[in-house]
Image: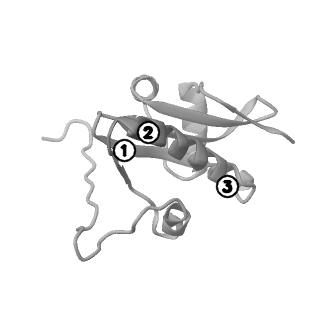
Amino acid sequence: MEIVFTKNLSADEYNILHRSVGWGKCIPEKVNMALERSEFLTVARTDGEKAVGMARFIYDGLQILLMDVIVMPEYQGRGIGKRMMQDVMDYIRILAKSGGIKINLVTAPDKAGFYEKFGFTARPTETLGPGMTQWIERGTE
């Protein structure tokens, strides 16, 4: 089986990937907005068809937020995530030619080692505090 990398992904495919790793379903309109606003997107497909992995990031000119690095569990361990991250980092290096860029990401504890191989530092450190997050439900004030 050949893995082909593309730059397009539908909201349905996004949700299939998202659910495959236990992250739940997102509203398709919001998925489309997120994909449109992504600076970079790579999608791993089996023989150019089924989406089995994806990685994307958003970029504001100073910082990058790496989002949705997903490989379906049954396709993990085949180098797909590594290839996607190499593509991500290659593109970021191109962006960084005009000045330094800070890259941020949130990861599951058991995946931190994967990102460390690409030069990321686990937080907290002596100089960097822990990452923080908050989820706001619809209709809350």
In the picture, the quarter occupied by the N terminus is top right
Q: Name the residue under label 1.
A: 65
Q: Mark 3 points at which residue?
A: 73
Q: As shown in the figure, which amino acid type bears the numbered disc 3?
A: Pro
The residue depicted at 63 percent of the width and 51 percent of the height is 81
133 vs 100: above or below: below
Which element type, helix, strand or loop, lies under badge 3?
helix
Q: Distance between the residues labelled 3 and 2?
A: 21 Å
What label does residue 57 carry, if any?
A: 2
Q: Quadrant of residue 84?
A: top right
34 lies left or right of 100: right
Amino acid residing under circle 2: Phe
Name the outermost residue toward the bottom. Answer: 126
Residue at 40% across, 38% down: 97
Q: Distance between the residues labelled 2 and 1?
A: 5 Å
Return the x and y of residue 32 as percentages of the image width and height.
Answer: 45, 23
* Residue 119 pos. (x, y %): 47, 62
Q: Which amino acid does label 1 sit on?
A: Leu
Which of disc 2 and disc 3 is earlier in sequence? 2
- CB under 8 Å between discs 2 and 1: yes
Question: Against 1, is 5 above or below?
Answer: above
68 displayed left or right of 82? left
Quadrant in the rendering for residue 45: top right
Residue 100 location, quadrant: top left
Q: Residue at x 52, y 59 (%)?
A: 118
Picture mark count: 3
Q: Position of residue 38 (x, y in %)?
A: 43, 30
Q: In which quarter of the image is the C terminus?
A: top left
| Disc nearer the start of the sequence (1/3) | 1
